[in-house]
Image (cartoon, helix red, strand yellow):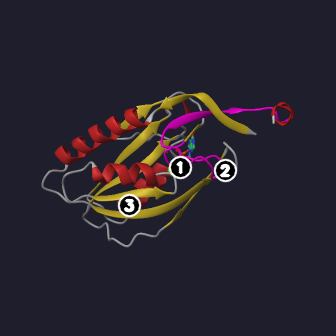
Amino acid sequence: MYRESQTVLFDEQCIKACVHDLGNKITEDYAGKTPVMITILKGGFVFFADLIRAIKIPVKIDFIRAKSYLVGTESSGDVTLTDDLSIGVENQHVIIVEDIIDTGRTLLKLKNYLLGKGAASVKIIAMLDKPARRVLPIDSDYTGFTIEDKFVVGYGLDCDEEYRNLPYITTLEEIDEQVERSEN
Ligand code: IMP
Ligand code: MG
């Protein structure tokens, strides 16, 4: 059983400033183009919604679904992509918007998939990066925050589907159920 730790890792203001900076970089780097921005559901949706509004050039948006987690905080190691794309990516400049890069399995699979569909370029924006956990050689082109090897929730990120609606990012701590029961 888990509960939110007392200290917030990144608060709303800090996230807002970071998203604003990332939006400016995309606006600059993709000037004159209309990139196709794709987020990976469900985790990326909050970051995606804020980021696209911080970008001042035209963009197209689409969604893809990836599943790599079983329950709790441990990965199944196997990534399944569900292609829900309604925009053709052939010859398009694609930007993948991801909540967090952990092992790198999801992003490597999706990047190769999009290149295989003929995308002109595929870049990655990750709100969070946990480099210590990487098992495959992939990095983001734009990164919000680099963090230690800790399981985090909030701002779209979940633990067993909870916590996605927190406006900040925080870590979870494991609690002893016996202790928790006596506290309540
Ligand atoms: P991957 O291991 O890089 O393929 O990460 C896949 C997905 O695992 C991420 O997109 C997240 O949805 C999820 N994930 C990885 N680390 C965390 C975390 O600390 N909190 C919540 N979800 C995570
Ligand atoms: Mg995700």
Three-letter code, disc 3: Leu
Q: Quadrant of the C terminus?
A: top right
How many residues crowd mark 3 within 10 Å: few (<14), some (14–19), many (20+)?
some
Image location of residue 89, percent across then percent down: 31, 66
Q: Mark 2 vs mark 1: which is more N-terminal?
A: 2
- Viewport quadrant of the N terminus: top right
Q: Residue 114 got which mark? A: 3
As for residue 142 lying within the magenta part, the answer is no
Q: CA distance from mark 2 to mark 1?
A: 13 Å
Query: Label 2 amino acid?
Result: Asp
Q: Cβ–Cβ below 8 Å for labels 3 and 2?
A: no
Which is in the foreground here, disc 3 or disc 2?
2
Residue hosting label 2: 160
Which residue lies most toward the left here? 32
Residue 118: percent from the left, percent from the top? 31, 64
Q: Magenta segment range?
A: 154-177
Whether residue 79 sits left or right of residue 45 in the image: it is right
Total marks placed: 3
Residue bearing the label numbered 1: 165
Q: Classify residue 182 as left or right of residue 126.
A: right
**Does the magenta segment cover residue 172?**
yes
Q: Is mark 3 within 8 Å of ligand 1?
A: no
Query: Considering only order in the chain, which callout, 2 or 3, is on the residue closer to the N terminus?
Result: 3
For the residues carrying marks 2 and 1, which lies nearer the camera in this image? 1
Q: Please, what secondary structure does the residue beneath circle 1 have?
A: loop
Prevailing secondary structure class for the magenta stretch in the rendered image: loop
